[in-house]
Amino acid sequence: MNVFPNPYIGFNPQELNKYARFVTFTHLPRKATVRVFNLAGVLVRTLLKDDTSQFFQWDLRNEDGFPVAAGMYLVYIDMPEVGKTKTLKLGVIPEQQFIDRW
């Protein structure tokens, strides 16, 4: 399992426009629960996957629909059919905070 792009730095090459931001989780089983936490341990978003694709996208928004802040996130993936869990680290740097001039 993996998440790309990681770190997310202002854009994803697969995005069609700058208003539809996302990261993609790969190699997931049919059913999975993805929980995203900030480093303070606060739950940012819970995502439920229940389809045959191995890919799953997160729109980089919290439970209230607001874009997440820049920082590090811990992603806890629970896979009940497989009986395993996986923890990933994800860095997010939104476009507004990305320095493109040196």
Image (spheres, helix red, strand yellow):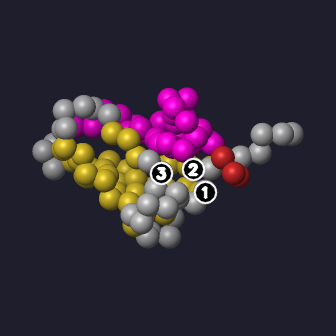
Single out the mark in the foreground, 2 or 3: 3
Q: What residue type is labelled 1?
A: Ala
x 46%, y 41%: residue: 23
Q: Distance of mark 2 from mark 3, alpha carbons? A: 9 Å
The tag earlier along the polypeptide, 2 or 3, is 3
User: Quadrant of residue 101 in the image?
Assistant: top right
* Residue 92: image tag: 2
Q: Do the residues labelled 2 and 1 touch (CB within 8 Å)?
A: yes
Q: Residues within 10 Å of mark 1 (few under 14, many from 20)?
A: some
| Residue drawn at point x = 47 percent, y = 36 percent | 4
Q: In this view, does 92 lie to the left or right of 36?
A: right
- Mark 2, secondary structure of its residue: strand
Identify which amino acid the numbered label 2 is placed on.
Answer: Val
In the displayed structure image, the side of residue 85 where residue 102 appears, left or right = right
User: What is the magenta range?
Assistant: 1-29
Of the image marks 2 and 1, the number of the one nearer the N terminus: 1
Quadrant placement of the N terminus? top left
- Quadrant where the C terminus is found in the figure: top right
Residue 2 located within the stretch drawn in magenta: yes
* Contact (Cβ within 8 Å) of mark 2 with mark 3: yes
Q: Name the residue under label 1.
A: 70
